[in-house]
Amino acid sequence: MLETSDQIETFIDRMAGHFPHQPTEGQGRLIHALARFFFSTQPRCTIMIRGYAGTGKTTSVGALVGALRTYGQRPVLLAPTGRAAKVMQSYARMHASTIHRHIYRSRKSTDGNPAFGLAPNTLENTVFIVDEASMIGEGGQRSSQQSLIYRSLLDDLMEFVFSGAGCRLVLVGDDAQLPPVGESESPALNENQMRRDFALTVATMRLTDVVRQEMDSGILSNAHRLRLQIDEKNIGWPRFSLEGMADLHRINGHELQEYIEDAFAQHGEDHVAIITRSNKRAQAFNQQIRHRILWREESLEAGDRLMVVKNNYHWLASVDSIPTSLLANGDVVIVTKVLKRFDRYGIDFAQVEVELADAQDWGPFEVCINLSILESDLPSIPYAQVQALQEAIAQDYVHLGSKSAILKAVKRDDCYQALQVKFAWSMTCHKAQGGQWKSVIVDPGFVTEETLSTDWLRWLYTAFTRAQSELALLNFSDDFFD
């Protein structure tokens, strides 16, 4: 058996060998920390990898996966959204799943309706690697029914991972990005809070050196400027440099349609996104794209890209070919066929066939869509409207007699379970978080000196770092540029 120091040196050599370039000084320190982490015998062992865009987090994680596999390990790769999992899968070169799909399983509740609980973690001595950890919120509290929508994803992730003997956790993220909705910071990247709340043995490594190969990127060099401004708590106009930056463009509204058409032609619809400040502006952009670029006339047509805006457990429950029951908030589906449109209770619905954009190999499945929210400026259907719909549907089942039987029938009704979706070419930054696109257009809206704040700079930094190949700044005033 090798001595511990020899084991660590061997691991370091193996991981360094999986880097495509000479590791930076910060990556070198991270490699040493990961080696100690891998051989540690401490309980509930966790390491956080925090870092700027361009500092090589993804390269480091890819090298870690490669090194683990030389030890016969098959790490579990997780991310908060389908798009983030797809990005992770591409750079780690092995399967990645959303957190929800991996840790939850459906079961029957006492009233016969779908319910969800934690799956058993049957793995031992396995490394779980979670990317985009800044997005993981504490959210809500547990209900007596243990219903998923009232559970804390962070609590459940910790419970799931460490219920497996000898399992350990790597949390990867950028704490300059937007925190989860309703929270002032990202709890999953707060070392002291995680140690206190979950009794973890935890260490943090922070990558700050921008990889030399990345500094030629206008996107990353300007994102780096933003990150430094956030760190320095400098609440002033960010200053961007376009000189010699082929991947960074400044455009105005008159140029937008031609720019989108060129981006669609070059990269494809799936690889272009417009990130904006509000649902109202996202809705306006989506309608312009549908009508003026894609020439769609009906309210919904084959080829439309839709983002789920509320978790739904109904439609996949009976689809045997798909290994999850959850259509999660943020999942993107592509309409393959519109089967029928109909009106019920004064609301327009559509029965359609769709496929998951991040898992098209799972094949198509049918859903019912509530069209009232599709073209609305609202982020989702207001609670009062959901209640009114429930009461209207209940009238169809009064013959069942008891309140419990009527409620059970309502919860199984296709119109009550109709999917809530928005068009998915343009979205708010919170919806875009975790995803990356080859071409991104950022629309900041109307910005004044009073608009500027740390939160706004984090919004802009998050939007910048969604772009992989090219970034267009739409209607940015002269105040933003050197």
Image: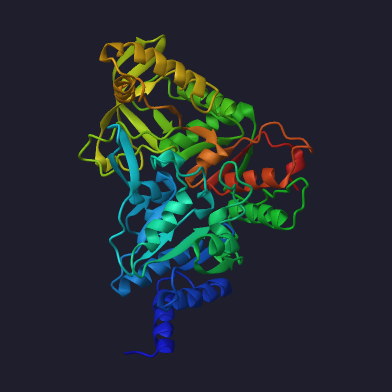
Q: Residue at x 39, y 10 (%)?
A: 345
Front residue of 319/357: it is 319
Residue 297 visible at all? no
Q: Nearer the viewer, residue 472 or 40?
A: 40
Quadrant location of the N terminus in the rendered image: bottom left
Residue 388, compared with residue 427, is above or below; it is above
The location of residue 118, given as percent across then percent down, is: 35, 50
Q: Position of residue 48 (x, y in %)?
A: 52, 64
Image quadrant where residue 278 sits: top right
Residue at the extreme left of the image, as rendered: 320
Return the x and y of residue 254 as percentages of the image width and height: 62, 26
Residue 2 in view:
yes
At 43% from the left and 72% from the top, the residue drawn is 43
Q: Is residue 402 above or below residue 277?
A: above
On screen, residue 234 versus residue 126, left or right, reads right
- Nearer-the-camera pick, 398 or 381: 398
Extreme residue toward the front, this view: 402
Kindly identify the residue that appears in the image at 68 percent across and 55 percent down. 225
Measuring 40% from the left and 41% from the top, which residue is drawn there? 148
